Amino acid sequence: MHDFVRQLLRGSDIAIFAYFVALNSSCLVLIGPAAAGFARQLRRAAFAGTDDMFRSPLTPPVSVIVPARDEGAAIVPAVLAMTALRYPRYEVVVVDDGSTDDTFERLREQFDLVEVPRVMPGEVPYRSEVIAVFVARADPETLTVVRKTAGGRADAVNVGINLARHPLICMVDADALLDPDALLSVTKPIGDDPLRVAACGGMMRIANGCRVVGGRVVDVRMPRGWPARIQVVEYLRAFLMSRTGWSRAGGPVVISGALRVFRRDLVVRVGGMDPQTVGEDAELMVRLHRHLRERGEDYRTVFVAEPVGWSEAPSSMRALGRQRRRRHRGIAEILGRHRGMIFRPRYGRVGMVALPYYLIFELLAPFVELAALILLPLGLWASAVDAAFGWRFVLVAYGYGLLVSLTALFVHRGPRWTDILRGVGAAALENFGYRQILALWQVAGALGAGRGREAVRGTTNRSGFEMVGAGHRPD
């Protein structure tokens, strides 16, 4: 019996060792084409044609939808940046989802909002009550603010989709600060191939510690706290690996994050956002893949590797925990709802490669992480594995992972070497406590989905941005 237990522990440790080798190798493989694509975009930046798009009367107009709930600390600089974008024709629709703070009051004071009568279409379902619609007195065609009863983020986006007047819809988080050319960059793939490109996403960076003037990031710096610095490394690694890498490999399965653009007709066709999942933006993307694949339509999804915006990361561990539990619950819900696509040739790369990757290396990763923390010490204690195997295990699980993080950091290096050195320190510190706590949060989120508990998004306590001055829309 004792020998059987030792063999079981040895087999488990070897299996987990092989898992970490495969996980980190797949990350490095995805970062390779992502880095090549990013370098290619940098070389072509001066010839990207954004000036031509800005001047062209054929550039498709965009409706920017901003769901907001209790975002008073960050809402004004974010909307200032959105109303000052360099784009020929667009509108910003802010949907106040029953905020209990001063979100609406700050918007009304900053933009001199006036109430207007507006008929609410019902092209996509929503379950809340629209209280009133407002526009900016000085520019009613650009900014619309909707007040509604609380119904959740997906419900708020669906209200915005119904009010959107343009053929493209851009979903933006309320804490996002967009660069002036963000819309030009993220919609260019659709302008280049309007009949095939169904959705586009853009690279986001963390704005914590940066200086904001008139709703724009003017001084890029690493955040002051180490948890936020580790999140910077995570963002770079995640966007390079999961978004840019998949885009170069044939199209990203999930376009989530703070900025994404969809063809409005396709979103309406699939019924808009699903309020029954906390990962509604990612679920919409997978549902769109499923819809188009089942109808045999020729389409593409694209991720733009150049930075187009900035987002505030959670500054407290409590808020970070809520965010990570919610995200992993979203992954579990998506894979559960669309499990019929996994390993199905009918769904092409999405069903045969991408969704299996999310199942094996995204959903299961924290479970394996926690199992390793238990089984490796047990294996050493029971002499099922020796110390040499233990060191190799640590090097593969943590050293190899550190190499992946450093690769992402240096590919997307910042303007200051001091910030890069801080990023290197954050990548190293990530392995000591942070990564293990993260795994606990993620497992809790996945188990919450499995037990069918009601999903509660909660609110993120924003500290706001260091903002100076006011923005204006360019001529």
Image: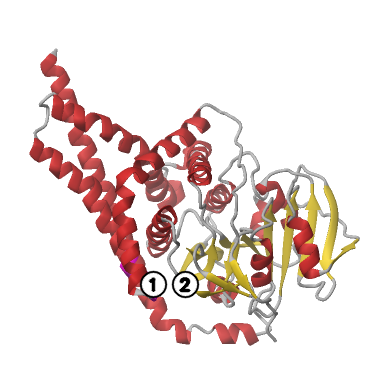
Q: How many discs mark residues in the rendered view?
A: 2
The residue under label 2 is which amino acid type?
Val
- Say left or right for 246 vs 333: left
| Residue numbers of the magenta segment | 408-415
In this view, 329 is above or below 184: above
Q: Which residue is mark 2?
A: 220
The residue under label 1 is which amino acid type?
Gly
Q: Residue 393 placed where, x, y %?
A: 18, 42
Q: Residue 470 placed where, x, y %?
A: 68, 76
Q: Earlier in the sequence, mark 1 or mark 2?
A: 2
Q: Which residue is mark 1?
A: 414
- Locate residue 251: give its quadrant: bottom left
From the viewer's side, name the closer residue of 302 and 13: 13
Q: Residues within 10 Å of mark 1 (few under 14, many from 20)?
A: some
Pick out the residue farthest to the front: 224
- Say left or right for 159 vs 87: right
Q: Residue at x 88, y 59 (%)?
A: 118
- Say left or right for 48 vs 92: left
How much space separates mark 1 and mark 2, taking CA atoms? 8 Å
Determine the secondary structure under disc 1.
loop
Verify CB contact (< 8 Å) between mark 1 and mark 2.
yes
